[in-house]
Amino acid sequence: MTKYPMVRISGSLLISTLIFQLGCASRMSMRSQKGTQSQAAAPTAASSTATATTVATVQQPATPATTPVAQKTSTTVTGAVTTPTTTPTTTPPTTAAAPVVTPVVTTNNNDDDEPVTDTITHFKIEEDDKEAPTQATELEAIPVEINPLVEKWITYFQTKGRNHMERYLARSTRYEKLMKKVLRDNGLPEDLFYVALIESGFASHATSHAAAVGYWQFIRGTGRRYGLEINRFIDERRDPVLATQAAADYFKGLYSLFGSWYLAMASYNVGENRVKREVMKNSTRDFWELVRKRRLPRETMNYVPKFIAAKLIAKYPDKYGFEGIDYMPPIEFETITVKESLNLRVMAEKLNIPYEDFKAFNPKYRGEIAPAKNGALDLRLPVGMTEQGLQAAATSVVDKVEYVADAGETRVYRIRRGDTLGGIARRFRTNIAYLRELNDLTRRTRLRIGRRIYVPDRTPLKDRRDQAAVAARRIRQVPLNQVTGGEVIEKGARYYIVQSGDSLYSIAQKYNTSIGQLKRMNRLRKGRLIRIGLKLRVPGEVSDERETSQRKGTSKLVHKKTYQVAKRTASKRHQKKKYHVVKRGESLLQIAQKYDISLSQLKRKNKIKDAEKIMAGVKLVIR
């Protein structure tokens, strides 16, 4: 007999469960009544007896008798060996309905579920390996059935989808131990881990066309129903622990509703209400029967076969031709708790950790600022860095919590007349769902002309490096007194030239001021990103005597360097403007020899493919 754990189900799912069970019982009652009336030959007394029997059946459904019909051969996977097994197939009589599964549930007193709590404060592989064998799975294992649909998906992953599968497999080992521990602690089969593989490929920022986000692809409403916090600063759908805990709660409710893992996974994909309707209409809890009758959407009919195929390949990669995968090391971390909001970029610099690696430990924070909630902020750190983390956190506190987008990932775009989210998404090679999530826009939000939103920064990395180099040259050629650290004195005011790695917070800390004061002094609007080479005014006036003395000491040197730069620039400009007008009878080779340059260089400068087709009167660029 299946052992059902205590399940935390939201109020809406509990109501759906009760309605579903009553619907199944009602259908069984109607069919039983029709069968009784068709076989009745006795007078009214016998009929009333049959009716009384029917009512009793509704209150206490009996196990229907079965009649063996035929032997059905199926394929069962045990370990790495595939063995055919023969199981008897039974057909219930016409008066019986699908078996009713009665869940044991506990609900909250209020309508909203409690927030998901992070029960894993530290995670080490050695401790998990010792703990895993002692944990027992409460719910029955997920069956594996190989059929043509499953074989089709195995073939797809081996051919057309091979690159995707190799990338997913490489990332899977980073989260496998962690996510399986969460599932195991909830009494669920560990194989549900492979649902995340086909949902997101273990990418925390994965976003679907339906605005589903994170490892387990929760839409906003379902995520909040299961306690995930989603706002401008935090999106817990991107957290591997919290999102897995929410998925575990959801799967326990779905399995308690249907009593079938295949139907539970189908409901996870399309929604439990759609699956309930089809189960009641067709009086079957056999997922493959619903697929055979084409009663589910195409994506849902392929969802379970895709899961089985991905699970088999992930468990036995060599068997299915996936050798030599460069697997990522498992994630291990420790957690510290502080009382104030922090700037994650500044903290990463203090810890001497790349910012991207630090954010990978804490992916739920959408930008650089991690806000404290109720006087507490939890942060994950690499193992062994607890003390350094507490020290770095003490010097990374922010005075004001405001959203700061990750530099290099996004840029600010100003809405123009005629713009739509669809058009902006196409322009920046993204989708509407991602833009809505990035800017916290609802479906009812209207775009106003002049509003600034965040969009993906599609500038090529090469161009970004070129822009940084140009900005650096501008800093070096400032024709004024330059003080150490990128500081410039100009007309009695102090300015700071933004350098690589700077942020408004770090500049504000350096000059003992606030981000808001810097924005007011430089008229920076909300959401604007600072770029390398930008000149920002900073607090602190400079006396005329200091400025005069500095000018006397360095003005000659500065003006001399500026003159030399200008002279070289003018010389280069003069050289670039040298041309030659082709005369009758001249060839490219003669022109190249005349100006002491190579023929290939001359052709390249003028984009000439055929040297013999040069015509008289054409102006050629020489330098």
Image (spheres, rainbow, N blue to C red):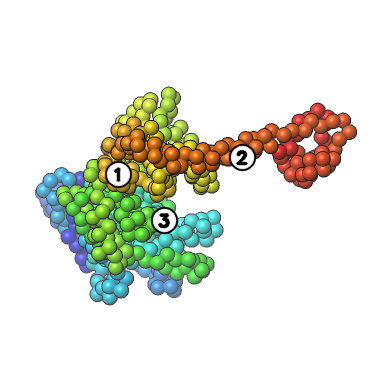
Residue that appears at 27% across and 37% down: 516
Residue topped by disc 3 = 201
From where the camera sits, is residue 480 visible?
yes
**Can you give x and y, in whole percent of width and height, for residue 173 in the image?**
39, 65
Image quadrant for the N terminus?
bottom left
Of callouts 2 and 1, the N-terminal one = 1
Image quadrant for the C terminus?
top right
Residue topped by disc 2 = 568
Task: Tell me the distance, in whole angstroms, between the alpha carbons under discs 1 and 3.
Answer: 44 Å
Of callouts 1 and 3, the N-terminal one = 3
**Can you give x and y, in whole percent of width and height, for residue 427 in the image?**
48, 35
Q: Amino acid at mark 1?
A: Tyr
Q: Amino acid at mark 2?
A: Arg
Q: Nearer the viewer, residue 294 or 390?
A: 390
**Can you give x and y, in whole percent of width and height, for residue 285 in the image?**
31, 55
Task: Tell me the distance, in whole angstroms, between the alpha carbons under discs 2 and 1.
Answer: 37 Å
Q: Are marks 2 and 1 in contact (CB under 8 Å)?
A: no
User: In the rendered picture of this protein, how many numbered marks are placed on residues?
Assistant: 3
- The reply, left or right, for residue 54 in relation to residue 231 is left
